[in-house]
């Protein structure tokens, strides 16, 4: 009986893991590989919840969190050959919660929560966001980053000079832009 339950869980996961147009890596068509300590799936709801050191990997990008929730488009390929029930299609959205990290070869971003929207290829990270690229550091309460174009925006919860929780950046000049002894 235990083997049948295990095989049913594997089959359910395989049905949910249909083709994906997700792009957490810039300009990548590679598959998204999601792993965690446990996974709970719902074929009828086209969802999967990965808990415990969850990671979504694509090409050279990684989205890591305590919990990852995937939401897939309903109506993908049929669940079984010869059946009329519809399966699940491409990923629409991925939500990350708890100790969220988005890492690429060029940058590291930490936040409390994140939502990846596959249709717009954007990751919205919220709650004590810290983005690091080389020595440069950007902080804020919310960051919206487009994985396709690389464009981003950081916002804070306060406005006005001297207010706490405004976006803040510390930027270091690169060696190629460093001042030289030559007069200008």
Image: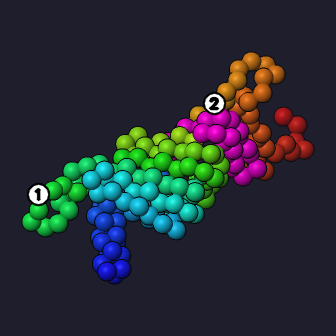
**Colour option used:** rainbow
When the figure is inspected, residue 142 is found, relative to residue 135, above or below; the finding is above
- Quick check: 182 above or below 49? above
Residue shown at 11% from the left, 57% from the top:
84
The picture places residue 55, in percent across and down from the top left corner, at 53, 61
Q: Which residue is mark 2?
A: 155
Q: How many marks?
A: 2
- State the extent of the magenta-drawn residues as a range: 126-151
Name, please, the residue furthest toward the top. 160
What distance separates the C-alpha of mark 2 from that of mark 1?
Answer: 47 Å
Around disc 1, counting alpha carbons within 10 Å, would you say few (fewer than 14), some (14 to 19), or many (20 or more)? few
Task: Examine the structure image and report whether residue 50 is included in the region drawn in magenta.
Answer: no
Whether the magenta-drawn stretch holds residue 147 is answered as yes
Residue 21 in sight from this viewpoint: no
Identity of the residue drawn at 44% across and 64% down: 39
Q: Nearer the viewer, residue 25 or 141?
A: 141
Q: Earlier in the sequence, mark 2 or mark 1?
A: 1
Q: On screen, 149 above or below 70?
A: above
């Amino acid at each position: 009986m235990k083997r049948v339950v295990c095989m049913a869980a594997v089959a359910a996961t395989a049905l949910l893991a249909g083709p994906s147009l997700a792009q957490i890596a810039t300009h990548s068509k590679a598959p998204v590989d999601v792993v965690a300590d446990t996974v709970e799936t719902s074929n009828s709801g086209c969802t999967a919840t990965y808990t415990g050191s969850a990671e979504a990997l694509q090409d050279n990008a990684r989205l890591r969190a305590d919990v990852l929730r995937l939401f897939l488009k309903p109506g993908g390929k049929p669940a079984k050959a010869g059946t009329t029930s519809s399966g699940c299609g491409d990923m629409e959205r991925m939500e990350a919660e708890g100790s969220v990290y988005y890492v690429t070869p060029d940058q590291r971003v930490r936040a409390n929560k994140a939502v990846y929207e596959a249709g717009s290829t954007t990751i919205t990270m919220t709650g004590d966001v810290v983005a690091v690229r080389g020595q440069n550091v950007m902080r804020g309460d919310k960051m919206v980053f487009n994985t396709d174009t690389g464009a981003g925006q950081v916002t804070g919860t306060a406005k006005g000079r001297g207010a706490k929780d405004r976006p803040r950046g510390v930027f270091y000049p690169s060696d190629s832009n460093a001042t030289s002894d030559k007069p200008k």
